Image (cartoon, helix red, strand yellow):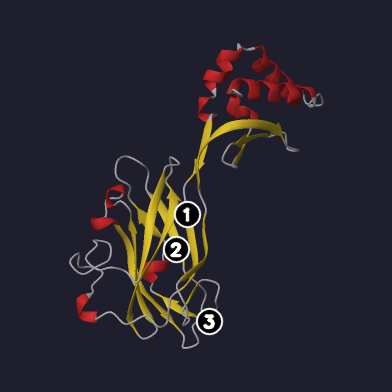
């Protein structure tokens, strides 16, 4: 296993050998190299791991235009006895998306779609399980998506597309996530054609907790840390002193 102190010590040694034109940098690097290796490790535990919270989710999918319309009187996104998040109403179509909180923990969000009018679908986004968030029944967002007669995306309620603040259960820092459902008059997101339900793409940023796997020095003499989840982090020498 590659340890943090081994990675940093090797990086510092390499950097020290290539910064001979900067005496102050040389002294700083040499000072670190002269320290006990365990002390270097203990001073830099904050660099052992790195994660990234999800901030954006986009989906591309076709909603079947031949789906029958659900009675309007039997559905209300704000009424737990008549909405999808509570389980009282079964969606016509669902898609799960994995998102990550600020600690790198994965969570599942379900996007439920229910045809409630001509070229019109009610949409709810809710946590599965609901106990992951503080919102009632786990419901994070709700609103309406509309399509043009030719099946292209027309519009979505701001209540769906505006950034959402996610309050996780426990002491995890809140997340802010934006849902991208499509572009007006385009087919780059949701569509409504007379064909079967089909997901064409689901994309989200963020990353689970990753462990430090390597380090290098860039042209600015910054130490570039790399992690097992594909993330990188640039730090200045002063952050190690």
**Going 73% across and 37% down the picture, which residue do you hit?**
218
Residue sitting farthest toward the bottom: 149
First reached walking from the N terminus: tag 1 or tag 3: 1
Circle 2 SS class: strand
Residue at the image point whose x is 48% and y is 59% from the top: 57
Crowdedness near tag 2: few (<14), some (14–19) or many (≥20) residues, C-alpha within 10 Å? some
Q: Is residue 12 above or below residue 53?
A: above
Residue 216 or residue 73, whichever sits in front: 73
Residue 161, how many percent across, how many down? 42, 67
Asked if marks 1 and 3 touch (Cβ < 8 Å), the reply is no
Q: Earlier in the sequence, mark 2 or mark 1?
A: 1
List x then y, in percent, for residue 104.
Answer: 45, 41
Mark sitting on residue 179: 2
Q: Is residue 118 visible?
A: yes
The numbered mark, 3 or 2, whose residue comes first in the sequence reads 2
- Residue depicted at x 36% and y 55%: 165
Q: SS of the residue at dot 3?
A: loop
Q: Residue furthest front?
A: 196
Q: Which mark is residue 55?
A: 1
Report if the CB atoms under discs 2 and 1 are less than 8 Å apart.
Answer: no
Indicate whether 222 appears above or below 100.
above
C-alpha separation, residue under disc 2 versus residue under disc 1:
9 Å
């Amino acid at each position: 296993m590659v340890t943090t102190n081994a990675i940093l010590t090797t990086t510092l040694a390499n950097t020290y050998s290539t910064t001979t034109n900067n005496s102050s940098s040389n002294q700083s690097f040499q000072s670190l190299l002269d320290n006990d290796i365990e002390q270097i490790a203990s001073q830099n535990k904050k660099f052992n791991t790195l994660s990234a919270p999800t901030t954006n989710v986009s989906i591309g999918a076709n909603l079947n235009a031949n789906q029958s319309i659900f009675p309007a009187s039997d559905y209300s996104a704000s009424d737990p006895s008549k909405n999808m998040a509570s389980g009282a109403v079964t969606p016509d179509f669902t898609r799960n998306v994995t998102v990550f909180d600020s600690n790198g923990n994965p969570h599942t969000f379900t996007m439920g779609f229910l045809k409630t009018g001509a070229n019109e679908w009610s949409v709810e986004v809710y946590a599965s399980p609901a106990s992951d968030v503080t919102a009632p029944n786990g419901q994070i967002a709700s609103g309406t998506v509309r399509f043009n007669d030719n099946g292209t995306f027309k519009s979505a309620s701001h209540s769906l597309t505006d950034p959402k603040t996610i309050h996780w259960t426990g002491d995890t820092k809140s997340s802010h996530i934006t849902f991208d459902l499509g572009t007006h008059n385009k087919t780059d997101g949701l569509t409504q054609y007379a064909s079967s339900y089909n997901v064409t793409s689901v994309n989200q940023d963020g990353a689970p907790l990753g462990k430090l796997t390597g380090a290098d020095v860039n042209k600015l003499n910054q130490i570039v840390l790399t992690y097992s989840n594909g993330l990188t982090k640039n730090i200045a020498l002063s952050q190690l002193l």
